[in-house]
Image (cartoon, rainbow, N blue to C red):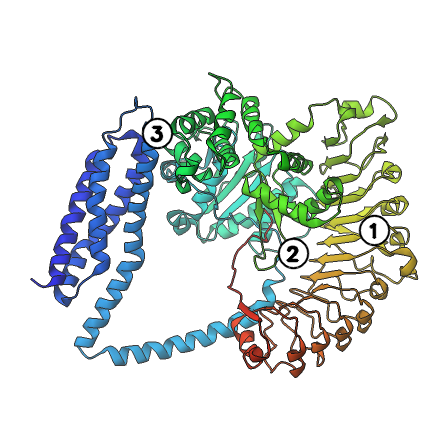
Amino acid sequence: MAAGGFVGAAFGEGFAILHDTVKHVVGQIIMFKSILKSLESTLDGIAPVVQEIRRSSLALDHPDEETKRLIEQMKKGKELILKCSKIKRWNLNYCFKAYSYSIKLKKLNNAIEKFCQIDLTVQNTRTALETLIKVNQTTTAVLETAAKVDLVLKEVTKQNSESKKKKFEIRTLSCAASRPRDYIVGLELPLKELKQLLSNKEVSLLLLTALGGCGKTTLVKMLCWDEDIKGIYGENIFFVNVSQAPNLKVMVQKLFNHNGAECNEFQSDEEAIDQLEQLLNEIGQKQPILLILDDVWPGSESLIEKFKFDIPAYKIVVTSRTAFPRFRYRYNLNPLNPVDAMSLFCYSASLHDQDESSYIPEEYIEKLVSGCGGLPIALKVIGGSLRGHPAGVWLSTLTKWSEGHSIFDSDAEVLDCLQKSLEFSADKTILKEYFMDLGSFPEDQRISATALIDLWTELHEPSENDVHAIANLHELHKRNLASLVMTRKEIDDYYNEDFITQHDVLRDLAIHLSNQEPVLQRKRLIVDISGNNPPKWWTEQKQQLINARLLSISTDELFSSSWCNIQAPEVEALVLNFQTRNYALPEFVEKMVKLKVIVVTNYGFFPVELSNFQLLGSLPNLKRIRLEKVLIPSLCNTLVLLRSLKKISLFMCNIGQAFGNSTIQVSDSLPNLMEINIDYCNDLVELPGWLCEVLPLKKLRITNCHKLPLLPERVENLTNLEVLRLRSCTELSELPDSIESLHKLSILDISDCLSVCKLPKHIGELHSLREFHMKECLRLRNQLPPSIMELRQLKLVVCDEERAKLWEPFKEFFSNLKVEVAKKDINLNWLSK
C-alpha cells in the first residue's frame, strides 16, 4: 500500500477510536459535559468525510503531514479523556486539574475544527487540482475561471468605489448585536438549549433570566451570531437594549434605522408601536423575525407586551435579572460550574502564563474561585485584579474575605465582593477615583472616552496633562473594570470616536462607593431624576448647599427642565445627561465659580436645542466644554466671555447657527483656546472666520463632517497648530496652499477624504511634520509634489496599498521613513449600542 494509503487507514482508525471513546463517556463525566458535547458534535460533523479522505489518500498516493499530526492528537485525546474520567471531586485540587484538562480538550477540539475548516479545504483543493491535471483539463478550467474572477473583481471594485462615499452617511444608531469579544466559557450548552426552546412553535416570547453578571447579554449575542439562527432569520435579527429607564420611541427609531426605513419623529408611544407593527409585518413576509430585548428591569413588563404582535414566525427573547411570572416560557441561566469558573478565573488572572517565580498555590486559586460563586463578572474582575501579583497578595485578599459567606446571598454581597477588587497599590490609588467617576453616566449607555479624559484631567491631574488620564483609562480596561472600545486602532492620540462600556454590577459598585457619606457632604454627587421628581433632600429647603466636586444629573424624557435651586460652590466638573426634546441649563450653573469642565449629553435620537447656554459665560475657570447631540444657537456670543477656555468638543451637534457671523475680538476673548474637536456635525458647511484668529490653537480636529468643502485660506494664521485632522470629510476637495505656513504642524490626517485629488504644491514647507495619514483618499492618484522630499522630519505615513505606491519614488530621500499600509478594519464599533 502507498504512503497515502497508510495515512488514510491510520486516520480512519484514530478517528473511530476517539469518536467511540467520546460517545461512551460524554454522559458520564459531568464536569466536562459541555466540552465533550462540543467535541462530540465536531466529530459527528467530520464523520461523513472520513471515508472521502481515505479514498483521496489512496488514489493520489501522496503523504499528508496535516493528517498525520491530527492522528497523533486524536490518539492523545483518547488518553486525555480516560484521565478525565478518573478525577474525583473529593480531591482538593480537582478543579485545578479539571481546568488543565479542559484546556487540552478545547485545544483538541479546535485542532479538529481547524482541520475541517482549513487543512481539509486545502487538501481537497490539492486533490481536485491533481485529478484535473491527470485528465488534462486544468489549463482550460483555470483560464476560464480567472477570466470570470477578473470580471467580478472589476465590478466589485467599481461598486466599492461608488459606495465608499455613501457609507459615511450611515447614522450612528443600529440594532445589530456586536459579536461577543470576551473569553467565553460555559455557554455552549445554554446556547444549544436556548436554540431548542426557540425552535418550539408554541414559544413566541422567551425570557432569559439570571442574577446580574451571569452572562445573559453575552449569551443572546452568541445567539444572534449563531450560524443556525442566522440561517433561519437572516438579516431580520434585531438587538435592542432596554435598561432601567427605557425610551420606547428611541427604541423603535433604532429598529427603523437598522432596517433602512425612513420615518419622522414619533409624537407618542402609540404611534411608534403602530408604525413598528406595520414595518415588521412587511419584512416578516419574506423571512422570520427575531427581536432581542436586552436587560429589562422590574416595572417594564408592560413595555415588553407592546412589542408582541400577531405575526407568523416572529419571536422575542427577553433578558432580565427578574423572572417575570407573567411569561410562561423561561430559561434560567445558572452561574458557572466549578470547572468553567476555574477556567474563566485562570484566564482572567493569566495563570496559564505563570512561571516558577510567580507560582500561585492551587489552594489559593480554589478558595478564590469558590468565593466568587460562579458569577462571571466577579471571576473576571477579581482574577484580573490579581493578575501578575505575587502569592502574598493573593493570600492577603483571601484573608479579607468572610469565612463561610456566599457571594450570592444578595446583590449587596456581590457588590461587597467586587469592592475588594478595588484595592490598588499605593501608586494606583487614583484608579479608585477614576472608577467611581464612571457612575456619573447613565446605565447601559456608551461613555465617551474624551468626556472621561476631560473629567479626569481637570479633577485629578494637577498638571492638566491628558496623558495620565489616558494611561489610567487603559489601566481600567486592562483590569476589567471597564471596556474600552477603539474605533480607530491606528490613531494613538485620538479618542473622540472611542467609548467606554461598563457592566451593570460594576456601575452599581461605583455608585455604592460614592454614596457612603451623607448626601450634602459627598465629593461625588450622582442624581437620577425620574419625571419631575427630584430626590427628597433636594426639595426639603429652598436652597441646598452641597460640597461635591463632581455633580452628575441625569433626567428622563418626562423631565420639564424645571430645576430646584441648589448652591454648589465647590463643583469643578458638571455632567448633564438628558433625553427631553427641550433642555435648559440649570440656573444654578451660573454660580459655579470653580467649574472647570462641563459635559452635556443628549441620549435621545434627535439633536435638541440647548437653552440658557449663555450662563456659561459667567464662569471664570471653565476650561473644557463637551456637547453631544445638541443644537447650539449662540455659541459665538457666549465664547466672548470664556477667557479660560482651553478645549471645546462638539459631537453630532447641529452647529450651523452656532458659527454664525460674529464680531468677537478673539485675541481678547479666547486667549487660551488650544483645542477644537468637531465630529459628525453634518450641517457644518463653512468654518467661521474667527476660528482662524485663535492664535493659541494647537489641535484642530474636524472629522466626519461630510458637507465641509473647503478650509479657509486664512488657516495660515494658526501658526501654533500642531495637529490637523480632517478625517472622513468626504466633500473636502483640497487643502489650501496657505497650509504651508503651518511650520509647527507635526500631524496631518486626511484619511477617508474621498474627494481630495491633490496635495498642496509646497507641502514640503511643513518642516515639523512627523506623521501623515492619507488612507483611502481614493481620488489621490497622481504623483506627489516634488516638495515632499523636503519633509525631513517625516517618520510615519499611514495609507492604503494604492497610496503607498505613490511614495515608492521618494523613499530613498528619507532615512527613517515608515510607510505603513493600514489593514482594513471592518467593524461596527462606531455604532451606538
Question: Can you tell which quarter of the image residue 688 is in?
Answer: bottom right
Q: Would you name the residue on which mark 3 appears?
A: 95
Percent position (x, y) of residue 496?
A: 67, 53
Q: Does residue 262 lie above or below 728 as drawn?
A: above
Measure the alpha-carbon separation of dots 2 and 1.
Answer: 21 Å
The answer to whether residue 359 is left or right of residue 174 is left
User: Element under label 2?
Assistant: loop
Q: How many marks?
A: 3
Residue 115 numbered tag: none
Residue 645 numbered tag: 1
Percent position (x, y) of residue 473?
A: 62, 44
Percent position (x, y) of residue 325?
A: 50, 24
- Hey, which residue is sitting farthest front in the picture? 357
The answer to whether residue 230 is left or right of residue 691 is left
**Which residue is at the front of the view, 140 or 235?**
140
Residue 493 numbered tag: 2
Identify which amino acid the numbered label 2 is placed on.
Asp
**Which residue is at the front of the view, 653 or 752?**
752
**Residue drawn 65% across the image and 64% down it:** 727
Residue 313 in sight = no
Question: Can you tell which quarter of the image residue 777 is in?
Answer: bottom right
User: Element under label 1?
Assistant: loop
User: Element under label 3?
Assistant: helix
Q: Does residue 625 lie above or below 765 as drawn?
A: above
Measure the alpha-carbon separation of dots 3 and 2.
Answer: 44 Å
- Hey, which residue is sitting farthest left in the picture? 1
**Residue drawn 41% across the image and 40% down it:** 354
* Mark positioned earlier in the residue sequence (3 or 2): 3
The answer to whether residue 723 is left or right of residue 319 is right
Measure the alpha-carbon separation of dots 1 and 3.
Answer: 57 Å
Identify which amino acid the numbered label 3 is placed on.
Cys
